[in-house]
Structure formats: C-alpha cells, structure tokens
Amino acid sequence: MLAYMTANEAAEKWNISHRRVLTLCKENRITDVAMLGNMWIIPINAQKPEDARSRRYVESEEKAVKPFLKWAGGKGQLLKEIECYYPFAKGNITKYAEPFVGGGAVLFDILSKYDLREVYISDINAELINTYRIICDDVDALIKMLYKMQSEFIPLNTDSRKIYYNEKRERFNNLKLNGNESINVEKAALMIFLNKTCFNGLFRVNKKGLFNVPMGAYKNPMICDKKNLRAVSEKLQKVTIICGDYRESADFIDENTFVYFDPPYRPITDTASFTAYTENLFNDEEQIELAHFVDDMHKKGAKIVISNSDPKNSNTEDDFFDNIYSAHKIKRVEATRMINCNSEARGKIKELLISNF
C-alpha cells in the first residue's frame, strides 16, 4: 500500500515553502499526488520536482522588507509603476544595480520578491552607505544602540526632546567630520535616530557638510524597528555596497543586469529649493553626463529605467529630458510631492520614468 505525506511534511523534507508545495500539487508536477477531502496528499517516496523556473530566478516567498529610513523623493508611491518594468521573469536578467540607492524603496521591493545572482548598490552619501554596511555587518550592536536612544528619547517632554535631539545632531556632525571606523556603529545609529525624529525625515546638509535639519513633531516615533532591521540585514548579505559615484557601477553592469537610476531630481522651477543630501549638487551638466552614461550601459545590453522630475509641470516648452533621453522611451506618471511652500501649489504632479526597453 502506498504511503503518503502531507504538504507540510513534503515542504520540510524538500526544504521549500508550504506554498510552493501546494503550487506543485496544483500544477500536477508530483507523481501520484492526490486530494483527500480538501487536503493534498503526496507519496512518501515522491521526488522533489525540478524547479521549472530559471535556476537564477526564483521568486522569493519570504516576508517583504521595507526601507529603514524615510527619504526625500523616496519611490514608495511609484513602486507599482516601476515594478511594471522589472525584467526578471524570463530568467536571463539575473543581476540588479541601483547606483543612487537612497532609501532603497525599489531595492527592497526587488530583494523581497526575487532571489537574484548579484545585486549592487551605491551612493555618494558616505553616512548613508555606512548605515547600510553596519546593518549588513553589525546589526545587533546597532539595534542595541538604537533601543537605548529610543528608551531615553520617548519619555521626554518636548523641550527635553529638543535638547536631546540637538545633542545627538551635534555628535553626529562631529563624527561625520572627525570620526573613524571605530565609531561607525554609533554614526549609523545616529543617522537612523535623526532620520526618525527630524522634520519630515529629511537628510539635508549645509555647504560645510553639516546635518542641519531641526527636530520634527512626532509623538511616538519608531526609532528601533529591530524586526525590519534584522530582515534587512539578512537581505543585504549578498549585496555589494559601494560608497562612490554612479560611474563605478560600469564594471558590474552587463547584458544580464537591470539598472535603476534615481538621481537627485532636477528642480521643477528656477526658484525651487534643492534638498541636498550631500555637499555636492547635481546640476544640468551632470544630468547630461548621466544620460551619456545610460547610453553607454545601453550599448552593453543592460535593461535600464531612470526616474526624474518633469520640467513640463512648470514650463510646457521645457524639453530638457525629452532631448537628452530622445533615444529612449519616456513615460509621464502621476506622483504627489510637497514641492512648494505655497500649499496651493502642492499635490499631484508628473514625474518621468525613462526606459531603454
């Protein structure tokens, strides 16, 4: 008489998820699989079916991870638009590069959904990249420090919070200018603390490179999200993390790579204030240089998406991006941005998603 096991038992035996076993049963991929009432039963000697999906593309069945920072210009609200471009399903695109990683909304969406062969991220913001590296390499020490800050900060009244916040901001700026690798955990913890407690989650520095955002008005900010930090740490283990210019990604990018470029946005108006997250601004000349770099990566065969502001929001005759990306496809999508100190000027605007496929 043939002996059977349950889907849960098969999942444990084959070291795959229960959901994956159910999918294999429904697709009749397991020999002599049968239904008993509303439950699948599987022959005890059944062999695990070979995965018909690409060995280099396996859709992740784990819980999603989310960005560990709030970030000006973050792509959370545009993910549904951007994910339409993900080219991983056919299996030939096995690598991902994000050379302006910022808060990493697209990165973490992709890491939550796909198990890729190689992933590369970079940014010129040294404090940001330090935080990614510490989460990857020393998350327990980071969590311990963040928990201490959260425990000290939350019970304070507003005036005491401001004093505490300003002390941490001064300490962060001191480490930013004079620190060394021995204090990288503290610098990362301060980066997250300030991000979670400052006004609007901005990361802005002055011309001297000093973080200068005032405290925000949050009643109970989540400073130490240890569950997400540990999940992020696990996802980052196989990610190459670089502090540097986007051009350094050229050696990584090839015909098997999907690249998402999210550079500092071009100001929509001449008077728009630029929220600088490094000491260096990204002017029109640099936007043009990036477009040339995109053309070079296109010639390598990479699949590429670029996002930016749409200058036509304020000047319908401004064809800046239409001109520099004339060889590629440009899609205008709707987004909500706080782009003006005048509340009547805030709200829905158009942004650009530019692709070479």
Image: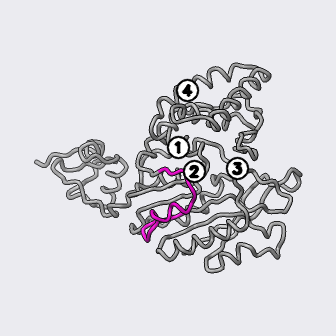
Report the residue at 57% width, 25% height from top. Answer: 147
Asked if labels 2 and 1 touch by Cβ distance under 8 angstroms, the answer is yes
Mark seen at residue 104:
2
Q: Please, what secondary structure does the residue beneath circle 1 have?
A: helix
Which label lies toward us, 3 or 1? 3
- Position of residue 97 measured from the top left corner of the image (x, y, whole percent): 50, 60
Instruction: Give me the C-alpha separation between circle 1 and circle 4.
Output: 16 Å
- Residue 211, placed above or below residue 2: above
Asked if labels 1 and 3 touch by Cβ distance under 8 angstroms, the answer is no
Report the residue at 28% width, 46% height from top. Answer: 15
Name the side, left or right, on which 58 lies relative to 180.
left
Q: Is residue 249 magenta?
A: yes
Q: Which residues are magenta?
A: 241-259
Instruction: Give me the C-alpha separation between circle 3 and circle 4.
Output: 27 Å
Of the image marks 4 and 2, the number of the one nearer the N terminus: 2
Of the image marks 3 and 1, the number of the one nearer the N terminus: 1
Q: Quadrant of residue 309?
A: bottom right
**Amino acid residing under circle 2:** Gly
Which label lies toward us, 3 or 4? 3
**Amino acid residing under circle 4:** Met
Look at mark 3 in the image and give the residue it sits on: 279
